[in-house]
Amino acid sequence: MIPIAKPILGEEEVNAVTEVLRSGVIAEGQKVKDFEAAFAKFTGTSFAVAVNSGTAALHAALLAHRIGPGDEVITTPFSFVATANSVLFTGAKPVFSDIKEDTFNIDPESIIEKITPRTKAIIPVHLYGQSADMKAIMDIAEDKDLIIIEDACQAHGATFEGKSVGSFGEGTFSFYPTKNMTTGEGGIITTNDKFVAEKARMIRSHGSKQRYLHEMLGFNLRMTDIAAAIGLVQLGKIGDFNRSRINNAHYLTQSLQKIKGLVLPHIDKRCGHVFHQYTVRIRGDLTRDEVVSSLNKKDIGTGIYYPLPIHKQPYYMELGYHDFLPVSERASKEVISLPVHPSLTKLDLDTISEYLHEIIG
């Protein structure tokens, strides 16, 4: 079986965890501080605040900006539901803009159409490992005095015009096992704003700066030293991981480019794409489900990210969302992600290509 994703954990991670366990300091210790400092340096930001999930990072970043009831936050419907749910957690309203046909990222022109006097922030998602159009989005934010919170949960190491994602506004990253790097589970907020960093640290720890003194309502969103120890090791490897993903993606593109009915990933020349996913579109005689079924029968794993846009999810329909967002809705019926992770061999890549030629070509 060629899996769609495969975490890469070695003896270095095992030894790092063992060191933490033997130290007796499992939570709120030096490893978390070291990981925060290292990740801030990785993204070129002044501060990083480690939390226990990517969702927690989004939630805390929004709360640190005092986003709440009566506010609107513009984001994409073509993402994991946590992007929009984090807005609901604050009492604010997610407002959905459509996506661009080529990159699947939020369309800046659609953002402009959705701005109202209640709009307070934009959450662009750097989907599949490719940055959204941050020049256009930052121009909109500056013109309309809006906050930018980047959902970079799939984009560790991605860049836009040479600048790291997560450094334009407040960045939020996930370290779920299938991401480009992992801590087992976890997340982090990156920022250049000392006030936001301080607020996020309070929010993650019951609203306190010091033990048993609580200045605001907060949560328990802390990362453990066990997770941070894994993250420190993984951070040292992510350059190699991303290079492997990029090389695998280029190999697949060269191998698959002649198949009619298969639309290959578009790379914006301004972006450093790190290929969290290698996502294609099916636009031929076969349906997407037929292609998925055929590949799975050949023991080739696939993923569909995402089969139902957020605004079409049952809960959001109950909330009264009835938007028509044609590009997102069309993409949800056509996309398939193929294996691109660093564990793939040349034989794996050739096998994927061979079967796609057989199934579609």
Image: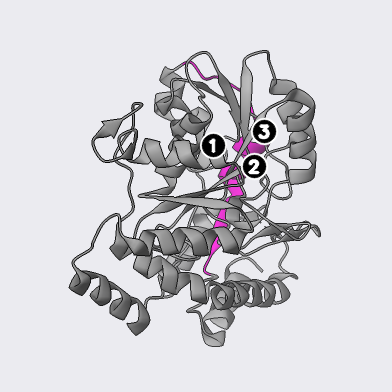
Q: Secondary structure at mark 2?
A: loop
Q: Residues within 10 Å of mark 3 (few under 14, many from 20)?
A: many
Is residue 203 rendered magenta in the image?
no
The amino acid type of the residue labelled 3 equals Asp
Dot placed on the residue nearer the N-terminal end, 3 or 2: 3
Pointer 2: what residue?
Answer: 169
Amino acid carrying mark 1 in the image: Phe
Q: Residue at x 46, y 66 (%)?
A: 4
Which circle's residue, 1 or 2, is located before the other in the chain? 2
Label 3 to label 2: alpha-carbon separation = 21 Å
| Quadrant of the image containing the N terminus | bottom left
Q: Nearer the viewer, mark 1 or mark 2?
A: 1
Instruction: Work out which quarter of the rendered image holds the C terminus and state it.
Output: bottom right
Q: Residue 315 sits in which quadrant?
A: top left
Mark 1: secondary structure: helix
Q: Nearer the viewer, residue 304 or 17?
A: 17
Residue lying at 50% horizontally and 61% vertically, measured from the top left:
37
Marks counted in the figure total 3
Disc 3 or disc 2, which is closer to the eye?
2
Q: Is residue 69 visible?
A: yes
Residue 81 seen in the figure: no
Q: Secondary structure at mark 3?
A: loop
Query: Magenta segment: does it hold 332?
Result: yes
Q: Which mark, by number, is residue 195?
A: 1
- Nearer to us in this view, 117 or 204: 204
- Residue 263 relative to residue 191: left or right: right
